[in-house]
Amino acid sequence: MIGFVGWRLLQAVPLLIGVSLIGFGLMHLAPGGPLAVYTLNPTIQVQDIERIKVIFGLDQPIHVQYVKWATGMVSGHWGYTFFGGRPVLEVILERLPATLLLMGSALSVAIILGLSIGVLGAVKRYSVFDVLATTGALFALSFPTFWFGLMAIFVFAIELRWLPSGGMWELGEEGSILSLIRHLVLPTMVLALVITATWSRYSRSAFLEVMQQDFMRTARAKGEPPAARLLRHALPNAAKPLIALLGVELPFLFSGALVTETIFGWPGMGRLFVDALNMKEYPVLMGLMMFTGIFVVVGNLLADIAIAAIDPRVRLR
Amino acid sequence: MSAAARVPDEAGTGAPLLSVRDLALHIPVPPHVLRAVDGISFDLRRGETLGLVGESGSGKTLTALMLMRLLEPPLDALPRGQVVLDGIDLMTLDEARMSALRGRTVSMVFQEPMTSLNPIMTVGRQIAEPLVRHLGLSPRQAAARAEAMLRLVHIPDPQRVAGAYPHLLSGGMRQRAMIAIALACRPAVLVADEPTTALDVTVQAQILELLGELQREMGSAILLITHDLAVIAETAHRVAVMYAGRIVEEAPVASLFAAPRHPYTRGLLASIPRIERVPAATLPEIPGMVPGPGDRPAGCAFMARCMRAISGCAAEAPPLAELGPGHRVACWNPADG
Ligand SMILES: Nc1ncnc2c1ncn2[C@@H]1O[C@H](COP(=O)(O)OP(=O)(O)O)[C@@H](O)[C@H]1O
Ligand SMILES: [Mg+2]
């Protein structure tokens, strides 16, 4: 088990190096290079730029820069922001709880809803419910998240005035759980929508496949009633592909969170990414890319461990 | 196992435990109707083994699934006829009450040992499940009984196997485990649908022996389904031969093997000594194939392949007629006894 985790983390190293190389390359290819934010500022003189280059080490050959940056990443020194000069890691970690809260609540809603819809659709295949669920999922999957976000704000915040349109708390109510929940509802709904649709589709087909297996007939022949067959036999067997799906879906969840946070002004990592992009805060962008890479690697690792825990035929190697 | 050893004196006597009357399953396959099971009747008495034999596609599995009420939609609405088990008509029972009988009073062993066990549940728990459900045993008692069942079906190291997952067991061991599940609650009737077909020849014999042994111990009646008359010869007290959804001959084992009356049965018997196992659906001695849903003749379904066919065979399907003690044949021109 420990050996497996170590081995998988080792396998992730090339992936993370790839991510960092792409990020590093993009930064240097961008118009104006890493210092675009300064070169486009008319009040800064050419000499100043040269001085800044030396300070940041940007005068050195590019591979030297990369190695310096990469060793810094590994040892936890993720550099400093251009504006304010704060440690990048600190800036990112500051935004982590908000993102985890949004992703966590959206994922919980999506899994519970998606699984229920999928199982019901599988049990009552081709029923009115099943057809509606299929159509609904197709609808949800064919519109972009930002459209749903804007519609949600329009309907629930502007027209009905039921919920706030953005932010995390009311002014002066920082720390109030009730205010937080009110602000969480719309972004959770919007982010959960697409995942729910995906999950309902996948869980429907996973259940359909499991339910036609021979061992399900055995369970029936043993006199197990429907609920026991569903919960004790079908669900654990269907869970395996769904957990694998969860690992695969993580990057999409992340990018969905990015869009959702931007629409709702949710102060998480997605919002940080967009702000950093606008301000050409390359150190922050690089840090976010690496963080996302690590997040996805760890997520997939957890999914694999969970699958091995469920299925005795899967060996952790 | 000699015939005398396997027939207890009282077996085959007394009121039938399971009584099947005019059981039919007509499946609409537009533009035809497939008469997969076409009105079969038989009795199964306490402690008795009735062999149900026939080529692949003759309707054996569907018959078994109808007895167990295990057909899935859309087939589940189609069965016609009566299945009376110990005075209870199973065909009209609601699903909850049928569920209470399954695994307790009537159990089933399937043809596919490799896929019939839940891959992610330990063998012990799978045996314990019906014990908890039907007999109300505590999980601990059930686990102990499950282990005892594994010992009973001659699985070596039952304690270890109880905690193991199915993929670690061979096909023969899995079928033993399936038998342990099916017999855990000591059911009155066991339906075994080709329990040895998927197994090696040597393992086949062991499983059949095990079934006979458990039957003597528990007194369950067994409906043993097979396409292999050799299996019947070794295990059953009585035989019903099925052809195209109908029973064409029914007799005590000795009588059937000594003096088969139906041309189809004779063909089946002729094919036994030459090859160890009769491969499904290939019977070199009987030319032709089982009729499909479209070209079902009005008369005897076997006529096209029959060497004894006479002019009357095309007009009407022959009914089962008693030609000897307990020996019934559905043929317009049966062979001499
Ligand atoms: N679910 C089904 N739908 C339609 N036809 C079926 C179905 N299952 C079996 N059949 C047909 O019914 C006939 C009898 O099948 P089966 O009982 O499985 O035969 P056996 O077990 O004797 O080999 C075959 O012709 C088969 O093709
Ligand atoms: Mg069959």
Image: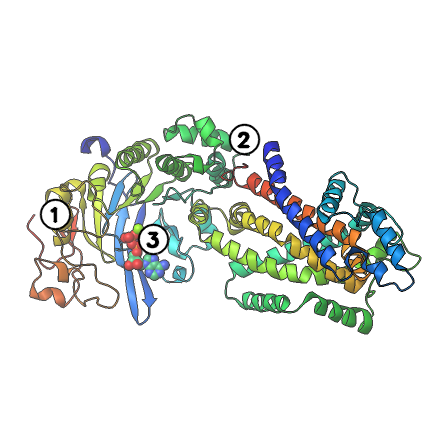
Mark yes or no: residue A159 visible: yes
Q: Is residue B79 visible?
A: no
- Chain holding disc 3: B
Write the residue at 49% across / 39% down.
A313
Q: Label 3 belongs to which residue?
A: B83
Some atom of ligand 1 lies within 8 Å of the CB belonging to the residue at label 3: no
Check contact, mark 3 vs mark 1: CB within 8 A.
no
State whether residue B215 is above or below residue B71. above
Indicate which label's residue lies in the foreground, 2 or 3. Answer: 2
Sooner in the amino-acid sequence: mark 2 or mark 1: 2
Alpha carbons under labels 2 and 3: distance apart: 36 Å
Secondary structure of residue under mark 2: helix
Of the numbered discs 3 and 1, the one sitting upstream in the chain is 3
Which residue lies at the image location 75% right of the left edge and 44% below the top edge? A69
Q: Secondary structure at mark 3?
A: strand
| Residue occupied by mark 2 | B140
Q: Are marks 3 and 1 on the same chain?
A: yes
Residue occupied by mark 1 = B260
Q: CA distance from mark 2 to mark 1?
A: 52 Å
Name the residue type under label 2: Arg
Q: Could you tell me residue A23's position as x and y percent?
A: 70, 53
The amino acid at mark 1 is: Pro
Q: Position of residue B194 (x, y in %)?
A: 30, 45
Mark 1 Cβ inside 8 Å of ligand 1: no
Q: Who's the residue at 9% across and 54% down the image?
A: B334
Outermost residue, front side: A47
- B130 up-or-down from A238: above or below: above
A63 or B154, which is in the foreground? A63
Amino acid marked by disc 3:
Val
Q: Does dot 1 land on a helix, a strand or a loop?
A: loop
